[in-house]
Image (spheres, rainbow, N blue to C red):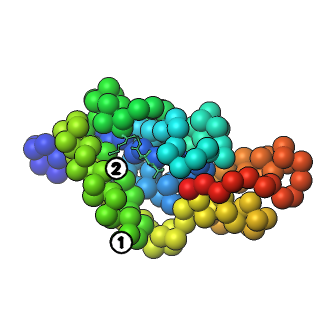
């Protein structure tokens, strides 16, 4: 890099519900942490799609456990508008992952809206092909039907899922579907 803006310190925010974090999320986090000098993983307090399976502190803890080796990554939470959080932490850019073409339409609207609200651009990382079909909602659906999700989530998330199953007192956890 030269002496221009590209070489200055850059702080990125990667927002999401992370209910739960998946290997796809971790892939985006690792790649973004290698590009930007600081990355704040921003966990939304109240996901828009019904009640989360995991409480806010559980989602934050799973993210911290799976990113602890990345020195420039912090995990925080926010409520209200993402644009307000981005301004509050003085971030330079929002990072999102794109898995499939159908993600693009809604993400484009979010990116335009966030830029209109806070003047900060969104940059997209294409999900690794191996993770393009993995979503939190699908992981939960497979898990709740007693499927093996070990290959789709970090070890800390798998432990949390298993603990959730045990605390529910049995093999089958009849919880509502979530994204
Ligand atoms: O992991 P998700 O559920 O796809 O993340 C969605 C999230 C949290 C990024 C989005 O719902 C969000 O930004 N929520 C905060 C409220 C907000 O700012 N809404 C306007 C978006 S332009």
Q: Is residue 37 visible?
A: no
Residue under numbered circle 2 = 95
Q: Position of residue 83 (x, y in %)?
A: 30, 36
Q: Quadrant of the C terminus?
A: bottom right
Of 164 and 71, nearer the camera is 164
Judge left or right: residue 173 versus residue 150: right
Residue at 10%, 44% in the rendered image: 4
Q: Position of residue 49 (x, y in %)?
A: 53, 49
**Mark 1 neighbour class, 10 Å CA radius: few under 14, some 14 to 19, many 20 or more:** few
**Mark 2 neighbour class, 10 Å CA radius: few under 14, some 14 to 19, many 20 or more:** many
Q: Is residue 128 visible?
A: yes
Q: Which mark is residue 17?
A: none
Of 159 and 6, nearer the camera is 159
Judge left or right: residue 46 versus residue 97: right
Judge left or right: residue 30 versus residue 172: left
Compared to residue 57, the image places residue 127 above or below, namely below
Residue at 74%, 60% in the rendered image: 144
Q: Which mark is residue 101?
A: 1
Q: Position of residue 111 (x, y in %)?
A: 27, 51
Judge left or right: residue 9 versus residue 145: left
Of 144 and 66, nearer the camera is 144
Residue at 48%, 33% in the rendered image: 77
- Answer with mark 1 or mark 2, whichever residue precedes in sequence: 2
Image quarter for ligand 1: top left
Q: Quadrant of residue 86?
A: top left
Q: Position of residue 10 (x, y in %)?
A: 26, 39
């Amino acid at each position: 890099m030269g002496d221009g803006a590209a070489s200055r310190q850059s702080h990125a925010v990667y927002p999401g519900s992370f209910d739960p974090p998946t290997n796809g999320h971790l892939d985006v986090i690792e790649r973004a942490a290698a590009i930007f000098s600081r990355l704040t993983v921003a966990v939304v307090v109240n996901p828009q799609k019904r009640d989360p399976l995991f409480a806010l502190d559980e989602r934050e803890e799973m993210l911290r456990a799976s990113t602890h080796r990345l020195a420039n990554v912090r995990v925080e939470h926010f409520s209200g508008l993402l644009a307000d959080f981005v301004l509050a932490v003085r971030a330079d850019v929002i990072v999102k992952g794109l898995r499939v073409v159908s993600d693009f339409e809604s993400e484009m609207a979010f990116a335009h809206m966030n830029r209109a609200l806070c003047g900060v651009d969104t940059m997209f990382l294409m999900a690794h092909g191996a993770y393009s079909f993995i979503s939190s909602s699908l992981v939960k659906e497979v898990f709740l039907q007693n499927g093996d999700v070990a290959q789709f989530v970090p070890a800390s998330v798998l432990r949390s899922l298993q603990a959730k199953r045990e605390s529910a007192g049995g093999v089958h956890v009849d919880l509502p579907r979530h994204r």
